[in-house]
Amino acid sequence: MGFGYGTRSPEQVQRDNGGRFTFDTIQARYEAIKPISGKRKDLNVRPLNERRRDWERVFKVNDNEYYISHDAWRGHQDNDIHNRSITWFKRGDFEIVVVHTPKSVWNKENPHRLAYYQLSSPSIFYFYDYNLPIGLSMANYKSCKYVAVNREDGQINYYSAEHGDITFQRRSGDKYWNPVVVHREFKHSLDRSKTKELRKSLEPFLEYYKVVEPLIDKTSYYYGNALEDFGSGVFNKVGDDVPESWFKIVERYKHKNQWYRGDVKNLIIKDLYQVAKPLVKEPVPLGTPVRDRYRTWVR
């Protein structure tokens, strides 16, 4: 797999291997796959399609539950250390599909933290897309990942795949899927009254910066938000005393300003907004995609 001449793109790989599975077809696929033999024979490793791509596997929980994983890597012998990608259930007359948001399963400190950014990988995105049943598909809306759901009236609804697992169901024999568990999204915008106060609180520091910055020879190397260690109230000066933290902040911004083309004031304001989060949020109707430019600030 690759992007060179004679190789397959990630989409082509998943298009070749995908099954657009329903409960019945994923059950049949599982039963038809011969487990990998050898050292891992006891682990019941069943690659979803190409046997060399054995990290893309299908699992049986019981007769009414199957799921596939995009990262069940061979180096990890514990079958529990991987993400579920899509799960299929059978409950009486209903077929249920759960689309799972990837989690940081390798992070020992927080193994259940959402790792929605994994969906930006073409291999993972198309793994989901080409294995969802007909009527459900993955959609990329301005870099945000959604599950697109065909409706009976010909319209398409979009439900975010980035905020946690989402569930759909349909009665046996039905064509269209109905949302059962989905997540409401919000669009954030700056609260102008709050940003005005923040910019005003910044004025004493900007005067301090103009005086101190030329006197600093050695800068403090820092590549993230230079204010994240100090909080949004760091510029609230009390009396005539200058907080000790201001000198450290000047060092950081002098370093950052070497690579920033523009007024350092704008850079400081942007970082201050990100720390203070002076935002107003507005709910978005369910089924409607949205690009929230401040989404990384509130996660």
Image (tube, grey):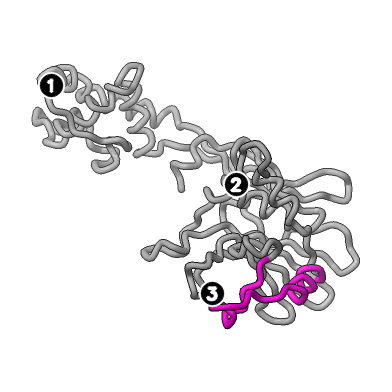
Disc 1 or disc 2, which is closer to the eye?
1
Residue at horizontal 47%, vertical 63%?
A: 105
Residue carrying label 3: 79
Residue type marked 2: Glu
Give x and y (percent) for residue 22.
Answer: 79, 65
Q: Which mark is drawn over residue 185?
A: 2
Give x and y (percent) for residue 270.
Answer: 37, 29
Disc 3 or disc 2, which is closer to the eye?
3
Describe residue 71's horizontal placement relative to residue 285 as left or right.
left
Residue at horizontal 16%, vertical 36%?
A: 245
Q: CA distance from mark 3 to mark 1?
A: 57 Å
Residue type marked 1: Val
- Nearer-N-terminus badge (3/1): 3
Residue at horizontal 66%, vertical 76%?
A: 35
Disc 3 + disc 1, Cβ < 8 Å: no
Dot 2 crowding, Cα within 10 Å, few <14, some 14–19, many 20+ = many
